[in-house]
Image (spheres, rainbow, N blue to C red):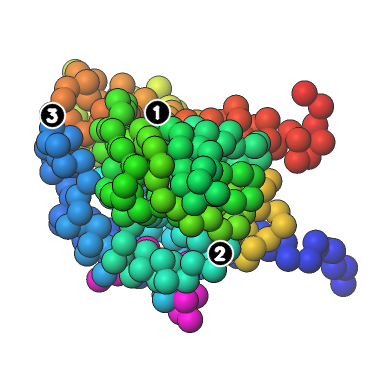
């Protein structure tokens, strides 16, 4: 019997199916989100000055513990893994839920590598929220431009960071001040000004942050690793969004009739949906593998995250565009949720690095000439 050599620490690709625990977690999150944040409620919230559903976030963190899934129990978390976090991301992407989950994921991944255990436990328990203060389009694998400087012997910050994810309601901001150093800043503290920026995705607002002598404490952290974990989890969010778009479109075509025929009976539409299903199946495989690599701290994570992020972004956008088009005239109205999914997909295609960015990173990782 022959065996196949594997790189130590690299997960086998066969164990990518959802476990019973993951499916139970999915059911719990879906039940809560469907009850408290159906799409019409999400749409109504976009017209308000309160873009984040703080009540839903409180229930997700305190009743289900979504913020602490990847945090060890001895550090105040649930002791699960990034695989479970990815399942939650799928469900929140499916509902375009207006909660600061993605920002919390990146912040948690960063804090896990520091000695900030009190803050980590508070974030894991939903008592505080944290956000990484880098521009929304900054991805892993390339140096993140440092736009904030240390002053006053290193204890004060000055500078500006634009388009920060999930900073609008954050209690703590994690600010890169060098390639390996992060400044921990109270978001409502002295010298910090937050301004909501224009954002295509009204369910995930961006924030411009100005630091003018803001007090901070500086810790050592692995920023690139946190961004890779974030990209892997974002791929799962994109997967959930794409699956929802496909499911809604199939349901619509089955119930809608034209010229005395069910729309789903037309061969051209069947082929289009079949192609989309194949693309989503591929996205699921890449997203699940990336989450597995993050959970196992695999050396394959940089490649897996780049593949998942590049493919997931394009599949989510394709699913949202096809869904809107195949819904016909109703899909273009404000009263239909199709535009919510399209805007989230378009924004997600840039968040934590564009598909082109991740393909460039991937080319470097596998020594592919430009």
Judge the density around disc 3: few (<14), some (14-19), many (≥20) Cα neighbours within 10 Å: few
Mark number, residue 335: 3
Q: Front-most of 59 and 210?
A: 210
Q: Splitting the image into 4 quarters, where does residue 98 fall? A: top left
Residue at (65%, 32%) from the top-left corner? 359
Judge the density around disc 1: few (<14), some (14-19), many (≥20) Cα neighbours within 10 Å: many
* Span of residues in magenta: 63-75
Q: Front-most of 207 and 270?
A: 207
* Nearest to viewer (mark 2 / mark 3): 2
| Residue 337 sits inside the magenta stretch | no
Q: Front-most of 120 and 343?
A: 120
Name above or below for residue 43 compared with residue 333. Answer: below
Q: In the rendered structure, which disc, 2 or 1, sits on the residue that comes first in sequence?
A: 2
x%, y% of residue 363?
Answer: 74, 33
Mark number, residue 346: 1
Q: Are marks 1 and 3 in contact (CB under 8 Å)?
A: no
* Nearest to viewer (mark 1 / mark 3): 1
Could you tell me which quadrant the N terminus lies in?
A: bottom right
Q: For the residues marked 2 and 1, what is the alpha-carbon distance in whole angstroms?
A: 33 Å
Residue at (75%, 40%) from the top-left corner? 365
The local secondary structure at tag 3 comes to loop
**Horizontal arrangement in the rendering, residue 183 relative to residue 264 (left or right):** right
Q: In the rendered structure, which disc, 1 or 3, sits on the residue that comes first in sequence?
A: 3
Which residue is disc 2 drawn over? 114
Would residue 236 be seen by someone viewing this image from the given angle? no
Q: For the residues marked 1 and 3, what is the alpha-carbon distance in whole angstroms?
A: 19 Å
């Amino acid at each position: 019997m022959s065996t196949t050599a594997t790189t130590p620490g690299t997960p086998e690709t066969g164990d990518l199916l959802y476990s019973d625990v993951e499916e139970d977690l999915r059911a719990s999150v879906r039940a809560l989100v469907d009850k408290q944040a159906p799409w019409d409620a999400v749409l109504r919230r976009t017209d308000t000055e309160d873009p984040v559903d703080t009540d839903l976030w409180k229930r997700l963190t305190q009743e289900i513990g979504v913020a602490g899934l990847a945090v060890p129990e001895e550090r105040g978390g649930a002791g699960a893994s990034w695989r479970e976090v990815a399942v939650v991301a799928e469900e929140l992407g499916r509902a375009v839920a207006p909660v600061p989950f993605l920002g919390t994921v990146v912040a948690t991944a960063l804090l896990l590598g520091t000695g900030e255990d009190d803050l980590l436990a508070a974030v894991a328990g939903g008592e505080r929220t944290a956000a990484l203060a880098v521009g929304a389009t900054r991805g892993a694998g390339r140096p993140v431009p440092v736009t904030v400087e240390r002053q006053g012997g290193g204890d004060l910050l000055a500078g500006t960071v634009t388009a920060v994810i999930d900073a609008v309601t954050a209690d703590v901001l994690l600010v890169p001040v060098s390639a390996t150093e992060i400044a921990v800043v109270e978001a409502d503290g002295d010298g910090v000004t937050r301004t909501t920026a224009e954002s295509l995705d009204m369910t995930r607002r961006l924030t411009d942050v100005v630091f003018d002598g803001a007090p901070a404490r500086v810790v050592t952290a692995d920023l690139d690793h946190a961004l890779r974990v974030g990209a892997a989890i974002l791929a799962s969010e994109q997967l959930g969004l794409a699956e929802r778009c496909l499911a809604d479109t199939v349901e619509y075509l089955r119930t809608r009739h034209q010229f005395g025929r069910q729309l789903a009976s037309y061969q051209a539409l069947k082929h289009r949906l079949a192609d989309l299903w194949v693309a989503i199946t591929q996205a699921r495989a890449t997203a699940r593998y990336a989450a597995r690599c993050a959970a196992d701290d695999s050396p394959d994570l940089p490649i897996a995250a780049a593949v998942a992020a590049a493919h997931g972004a394009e599949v989510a956008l394709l699913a949202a565009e096809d869904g809107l088009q195949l819904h016909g005239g109703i899909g273009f109205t404000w009263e239909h949720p199709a535009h919510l999914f399209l805007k989230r997909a378009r924004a997600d295609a840039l968040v934590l690095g564009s598909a082109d960015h991740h393909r460039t990173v991937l080319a470097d990782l596998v020594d592919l000439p430009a």
